[in-house]
Amino acid sequence: MQKQNNSDLIAQVFKNPSLFIACGFGVGLIRPGPGTWGTLIALPIHYALISLLALEALLFFWALMFFLGIAVCRSAEKILGKSDHSSIVIDEFVAYGLLLALIPNNFYLHTAAFVLFRIFDIFKPFGIRYLDQKVKGGLGVMLDDLFAAGYAFCILMILLAFVNFPL
């Protein structure tokens, strides 16, 4: 029965444009760890865009993706009948993409950012859990990940102040 449900979900994702985007172009269907896989989508997008766009345009792109994410998450929740379904990963890749745009382009920093972001996204400390529980709909799905990225950014800035990363 579970296999049929997974097949139905796969079919739905590839038939509905909103669901396809919300599920990270299908990456949210990968198990285990769809959020981790979804976060990784940001890397190729970021690396493709940094060669084409100035920082301001890159930040504008991620802001637009945030608002698109609110809309497609709202639509995906209606289709899937569940708030913040595990297959919805646009929140992870948009938040991590924004984080990548805000930090120096460095492998070690990007790796540290990935680890910190996933920790904050999974464990939801310091008010992130409150946002996750109290803010509903597409905004709620997107907002807790944005805060997780913000916390990761703050830790990275502290690390940069004290640790000499090879930039």
Image (cartoon, helix red, strand yellow):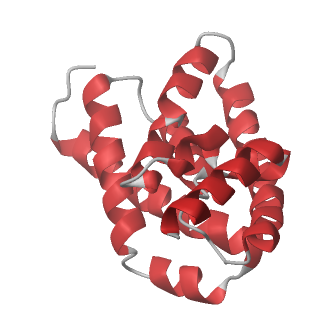
Residue 66 lies, in percent from the top left, at 72, 51
Residue at 67% in and 83% down: 135
Decide: is 83 above or below 4: below
Q: Residue at x 35, y 44 (%)?
A: 114
**What residue lies at 34% left-to-right and 73% top-to-bottom?**
123
Between 115 and 164, the one lying in front of the other is 115
Of 6 and 111, which appears nearest the observer? Answer: 6
Q: Is residue 5 left or right of residue 32?
A: right
Classify residue 76 as left or right of residue 105.
right
Residue at the left extreme?
163
Residue 110: where, in percent of width, then height? 35, 33
Q: Residue at x 76, y 63 (%)?
A: 76
How many discs mark residues in the rendered view? 0
Is residue 35 or residue 81 the one in the foreground? 81
Q: Is residue 16 left or right of residue 65?
A: right
Q: Can you tell which quarter of the image residue 58 is in?
A: top right
| Vertical relation: 105 (above or below) 32 | above
Picture quadrant where residue 7 is located: bottom right
Q: Quadrant of residue 9?
A: bottom right
Image coordinates for residue 55, horizontal then vertical, percent: 64, 25
Residue 84 image position (x, y, % from top left)? 62, 71
Question: Is 63 rendered above or below residue 44?
Answer: below
> Which residue lies most toward the top here?
51
Image quadrant containing the C terminus: top left
